Amino acid sequence: MRDERSILFSRRIHKRNIPIKYLAVIILLYIPYKIEAMPSIPESETSVIIESPGAEKNKGPIWDMVLKPIVLPAVTDSKLKVLELAGGSGVHTQHFISSILDDDKDIDLEWHPSDPDPASRASLNARAKIAGMEKFILPATGWVVGVEGGTACSDGARDTDGKAVSSTTSTLDDGVDNDVVSGMEKYSGYYDLVLCINMIHIAPWEATLGLMECAAKVLRKGGMLVLYGAYKIGGTSVESNLKFDDSLRSRNPAWGVRNLEDVVEAAEKQGLESVQNVEMPANNMSLLFRKP
């Protein structure tokens, strides 16, 4: 909305019939005043934002090749409820929400971001505030799963089969209480979409088991789970993915590029259907599952 000084400025120019050749000089003098008058973003908010070149690179293809043409038409009517696991820096969150609103500004959108890392949650929340998206994005939570961490719908208490252990509560270091089972029970059948990008290979296998258990419980019938990352097929992949796998395992033996077949099997054991695999740039894949 234009302020009163902008309106007066325009009226004076119009009233005085100033020649066009002088307008450029006036505008150049006026722009610094307007920039100085714009409200600044507090450094305390921008300083916690995490930059992610990888997320910046793949956010476009994930939206253009997967979410917009395939997933959202299948799960969206006038409302869309999304659980984003391993939200990371918030680059994807901000881009996807902005793109959704560009396509349908009247959509009833509710986005639940989550990440086990406090710094990532701070970045997610800061991006939401700075972008003016707090109406659509809930404060980031810290649901995690697996002995060494990972992201899903509980606090990491698992038995040897990766199944959630009931009736314990933990407090993450950001002070948020997260009950192991209540998160899944509270949102049972609630979400249209569960989104998890680049998590499976940098978390123990228990995290994938927890992810599938989570998605199967919190998705509504017909809802979809979308995964993105590098995968092996039949135990092998292109050379770059195999080198990536070696690098991950050297950092943590519990990490690694997963076999596509194992991921699909874990999903099917929870009652999810594999509906489509989409080949992505840089030898990545998007895996699409549906809750029947």
Image (spheres, rainbow, N blue to C red):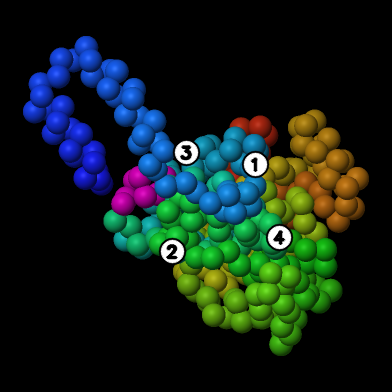
Q: Secondary structure at mark 4?
A: loop
Q: Give the alpha-carbon distance from disc 3 to disc 2, as whole Å.
A: 21 Å
Amino acid identity at mark 2: Glu
Count of numbered circles on the image: 4
Residue occupying the point 78% across, 46% down:
257
**Spatial separation of the CA atoms under disc 1 and disc 3:** 19 Å
* Residue 240 in the figure: left or right of residue 81: right
Pointer 2 or 4: first along the chain: 2
**Foreground residue among 132 and 74:** 132
N-term mark: 1 or 4: 1
Q: Is residue 191 above or below residue 4?
A: below
Which badge, 1 or 3, comes first in the chain's sequence? 1
Residue behind mark 2:
110
Taking 185 as reference, is 239 above or below it?
A: above
User: Label 1 belongs to which residue?
Assistant: 52
Looking at marks 2 and 1 on the same chain, the residue that comes earlier in the sequence is marked by 1
- Give the alpha-carbon distance from disc 4 to disc 3, as whole Å: 28 Å
Q: At label 4, which amino acid type do we have? A: Asp
* Distance from Cα at disc 2 to Cα at disc 4: 22 Å
Residue lying furthest top: 21
Query: Bounds of the magenta span?
Result: 99-105
Visible residue check, residue 160: yes
Question: In the image, what residue type sits under mark 3?
Answer: Asp
**Can you identify the residue that label 4 sits on?**
117
Is 184 in front, or is 271? 184
What element does badge 2 sit on? strand
Discs 2/1, front: 1
Is the residue marked by circle 4 packed among few (<14), some (14-19), or many (20+) residues within 10 Å?
A: many
**Residue indicated by mark 3:** 64
Label 3 or label 2, whichever comes before in sequence order? 3
Frontmost residue, 102 versus 243:
102
Q: Which mark is residue 231?
A: none
